[in-house]
Image: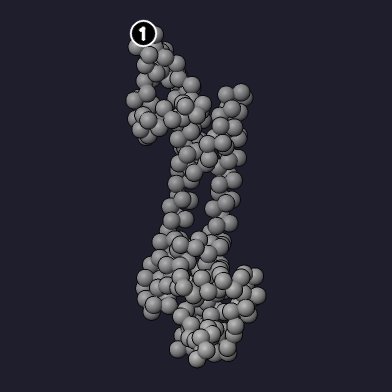
Amino acid sequence: MGDRLRAVDLAREAGISTQQVRNYVETGILPPVQRTDSGYRVFTTAHAEALRAGRALAVGHGWPTTGAIMRAVHGGDLETALAVLDESHAELHRERTELAEVIRALDTLITHETEPSDRDRGGGMRIGEVADAIGVQTPVLRLWETRGLLRPTREKGTGYRRYSASEARLAQIVALLRRGHHPFSTIESVLAELRTTGSPERVRAELAGRERELHLRSRSRLEGSAALHAYLLALTKTF
């Protein structure tokens, strides 16, 4: 791993610019470089290994996490590097667990709808009651209404918002989709279909797409972690 390389050699292999190679050195993604007497940077195959590991990590874990890991590695703090890596995998696990909860909640919501309560027959639920029921703050419901996602009626005289049983159900679905990080544009189209057809299939399709995306991210993170492991092995053989 001691063969000398130029910045352009690393750049060509990775398909990036020489300036990016220099940036990676300055941000700690690549290890420090020595300079010749004339000031030229001296790269080695160790830098090539680090570059491959860093870019593979970034695909799955993102650049902020990659930077933290590689800086710790090059600073001799392997414990911190592994802790950051573990937290990245744990974050994905939390997202997967949360998505599973969303899917279960949606199934319960759709398959166990109940008859309207006396309160519903009397004009529906007030905004605070809906907010408590779905676990959000009342300003969030007002925002969703402003965006056209929800359509509560208003009490005559007081102007208080009232949510029918079906509107409260839609509010719950919006909350579920937002918890799954779906954009408002997607939620708008899902609600339009629910209002038109009453079918939950679009919601299920969105959640299934989220599952596939998590699976791909999991594979990418695994590949990045494998690349880091290969780099660590190479370092131990070098030093």
Q: Quadrant of residue 89?
A: bottom left
Question: How far from the left and from the top, in percent, is residue 148?
Answer: 51, 26
Above-or-below relation of 147 to 53: above
Question: How far from the left and from the top, in percent, is residue 180?
Answer: 49, 43
Q: Quadrant of residue 134?
A: top left
Where does the C terminus fall, quadrant-wise? bottom left
Q: Residue at coordinates 43% horizontally, 77% vertically from top-left?
A: 74
Residue 130 in view here: yes
Q: Residue at coordinates 49% horizontally, 75% vertically from top-left?
A: 25
Where does the N terminus fall, quadrant-wise? bottom right
Indicate the colouring scheme. one colour
Q: Residue at coordinates 60% horizontally, 40% vertically from top-left?
A: 205
Above-or-below relation of 233 to 202: below
Q: Nearer the viewer, residue 25 or 101?
A: 25
Farthest-out residue, top: 157
Q: Residue at coordinates 38% horizontally, 67% vertically from top-left?
A: 83
Residue that numbered label 1 is attached to: 157
Q: Nearer the viewer, residue 49 or 86?
A: 49
Residue 229 in view here: no
Residue kind at label 1, given as amino acid type: Gly
Question: How far from the left and from the top, in percent, is residue 216?
Answer: 58, 56
Above-or-below relation of 37 to 204: below
Above-or-below relation of 166 to 108: above
Question: How far from the left and from the top, in percent, is residue 118?
Answer: 38, 14
Compared across the picture, whether 188 is left or right of 12 comes to left
